[in-house]
Structures are given as C-alpha cells and as structure tokens.
C-alpha cells in the first residue's frame, strides 16, 4: 500500500466511525461466552479511541474489568470491525462532555453520579467494508500514526467476505 | 415471564433473525483478539441454528476450528446478540441448497468445489433490542423449546442499554 492508498484507507475508516451513531460493543462473559450490545457512540474525532458512556452496575462493566479484549462492530451504511482493548475511565470532565439531557431524564441522575463511568476502546486494528463494496480493507493502527505523527504499518487485503 | 410473554419474546427474536440479510460473525483470533465480519445470513426458518456459507481457506474458518465460541450480531432495524458455538458442516446437499448463482460468478466455482463449506451456529442464548425500543429482552435457549417441544427457561431483563 502506497502513501496515497494509506491515506485513503485511513480517511474512509475515520468517516465510517465518525458517521456511526450506534455500535455493538462485543465483550466476553465471565464464563467465556461472547456477547454484544448496541451502545451510543460518543461523537468525537476518531484518533484511534472510541468512547462509550455506561453505568458501573452493568454486565459489560464487570466483563471489561475481567477481560479487556473487545471488538466494536459498526453495521450501518458500511461495516467495520474494530479490535482493541477496553479501559474504564472515571474522568468527571469527560463525563460532563459526553453527558446529555436524555440520559438525565432516563436514568434520573446526572454525570456527577458515581454510578456513571466511561469506557474507552483503544483500537489496535480495524477492518472495514465500505458502502456497497464487498472488498475488505484492513488497517493496523500504530497509535501515533492515527494521531498523524509518523507513517504507519497499514495492511490491505481483499477478501470477498460479505457474500459467503 | 408467563407463557404469553415467552411466546412473544420467542416470536420477536425469530422475526428479527429471519428478516435480517446480513450479520456480523464474531470470532476469536488465534492470538486472542476478537474480530467480526459481515456475512450473508442464509434464509431458513430460525429454530436455534444460523447458517453461513464460506470458503475453507479463510481466517474465520481457522478461527472457528481453533475456538468455536462465537457471537452473531444483527444490527439492521432491530439489534440482536446471539451467543453460541460454531460448527463446520461439510454437507453437499445443504451446500447445494444454500448456493446461489452470484457466488458462482464471483468465485468461479460451484457448490461441489471442496473449498466451499458451511458454518452452523448453535444458538444458546440471545438478547435483542426491538425496533425503536431501548429495552433489552433476553432469551435463553433450550434447544427443544425452540423446536416447540417443551417449555423453556427464558429470562427477561430490562436494561436501558442502547443509550449508554
């Protein structure tokens, strides 16, 4: 993959992530099954991290505490599989930033409630299938690269994956 | 959950699965990461099994051979997380049934080609979030139940999961 293809791959992935509203967060249960659930993707510039807001007393919270290996599925106009590790981040300023009134009405609490926390997904690699395409593009993150600091090690493969 | 609620839960899940065209099949890589990819769901009555057609020389094939714990994500009008185990099934009659002309043109082979095989997912439990709803319904399969033979052990929980 040359520099131009690399930039195109990077930009396409960024667009797919940033335009998605909902993602399925995939975790492993304490007894070793794989489960997923829809979650609202926080709207931030995608630099390799994905953010979700959650409550502490939930299965996903305990699953991540037990095993931080996760996948994030985006299945809207395009498909993406983002592979990485999850981290619980208890940052009040960020909770304030990501909070919105709908949560307040629904949960009868505000962002200062200690039950509220954040899940940060550190993406390590991603694969995507762009709108209308059956060709898979793969993207291996070097975190600095995503931050535009140095050339990366992207990979590209074409698999007719959707059809089969 | 009473009998009526159970039937409703069962029918809703069945409708979500049977109306989906594409699902994300989630597997674990040989080095322990979680990955997913869009695949065409075979159109069959949902009795607890999901079927995909694939080629043997693919990452998902080797991943399933190595670790059969999988999740199937449906994210179309409604969301579903189907938890189970995958099995490679090399049945010529079923390959014939699931084959279609589009595969033939794309892969330049037919269903009798030994590279073609089937993935059968044995669902053990499922959770779904029905269209427009943020309430999760959970469904624990007893396989006979799905086949209508005896009462099941469904569970039902309401979590405001999508929003957070």
Image: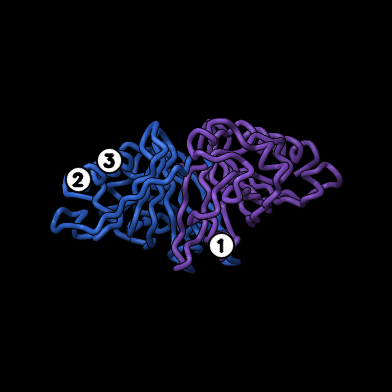
Chain colours: A purple, B blue
Q: Residue furthest left?
A: B149
Q: For the point 40% across and 54% down, which residue is it? A: B116
**Residue closer to the observer: B94 or B29:** B29
User: Pointer 3 and pointer 2: residues touching (CB < 8 Å)?
Assistant: no
Q: From where the camera sits, is residue B103 visible?
A: no
Instruction: Measure the C-alpha gap from mark 3 to mark 1.
Output: 32 Å
Q: For the point 73% across and 48% down, which residue is it? A: A154
Instruction: Measure the C-alpha gap from mark 3 to mark 2.
Output: 8 Å
Which residue is denoted by mark 1 in the rendering? Answer: B29
Dot 1 alpha-carbon crowd within 10 angstroms: few under 14, some 14 to 19, many 20 or more: some
Pinpoint residue A97: horizontal percent, then vertical percent.
69, 36
Q: Residue furthest right?
A: A149
Q: Is B117 left, or right, of B152 in this rendering? A: right
Q: Is A96 left, or right, of A134 in this rendering? A: right
- Checking the image for residue B7, the label placed there is 2
Dot 3 or dot 1, earlier in sequence: 3
Q: Nearer the viewer, mark 3 or mark 1?
A: 3
- The chain under label 1 reads B
Dot 2 alpha-carbon crowd within 10 angstroms: few under 14, some 14 to 19, many 20 or more: few
Q: For the point 23% across and 60% down, which residue is it? A: B143
Q: Quadrant of residue B4?
A: top left
Dot 2 or dot 1, earlier in sequence: 2
Q: For the point 67% across and 52% down, which residue is it? A: A89
Pinpoint residue B96: horizontal percent, then vertical percent.
29, 49
């Amino acid at each position: 993959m040359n520099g131009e293809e690399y930039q195109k791959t990077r930009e396409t992935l960024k667009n797919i992530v940033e335009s998605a509203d909902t993602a399925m967060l995939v975790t492993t249960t304490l007894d070793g099954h794989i489960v997923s659930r829809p979650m609202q993707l926080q709207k931030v510039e995608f630099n390799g991290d994905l953010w979700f807001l959650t409550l502490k007393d939930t299965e996903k919270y305990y699953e991540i505490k037990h095993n931080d290996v996760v996948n994030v599925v985006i299945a809207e106009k395009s498909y993406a599989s983002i592979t990485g590790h999850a981290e619980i981040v208890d940052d009040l300023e960020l909770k304030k930033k990501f909070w919105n009134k709908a949560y307040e009405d629904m949960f009868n609490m505000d962002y200062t409630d200690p039950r509220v926390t954040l899940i940060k997904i550190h993406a390590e690699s991603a694969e995507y299938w762009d709108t209308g395409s059956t060709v898979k593009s793969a993207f291996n993150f070097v975190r600095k690269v995503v931050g535009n600091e140095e050339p990366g090690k992207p990979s590209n493969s074409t698999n007719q994956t959707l059809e089969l």
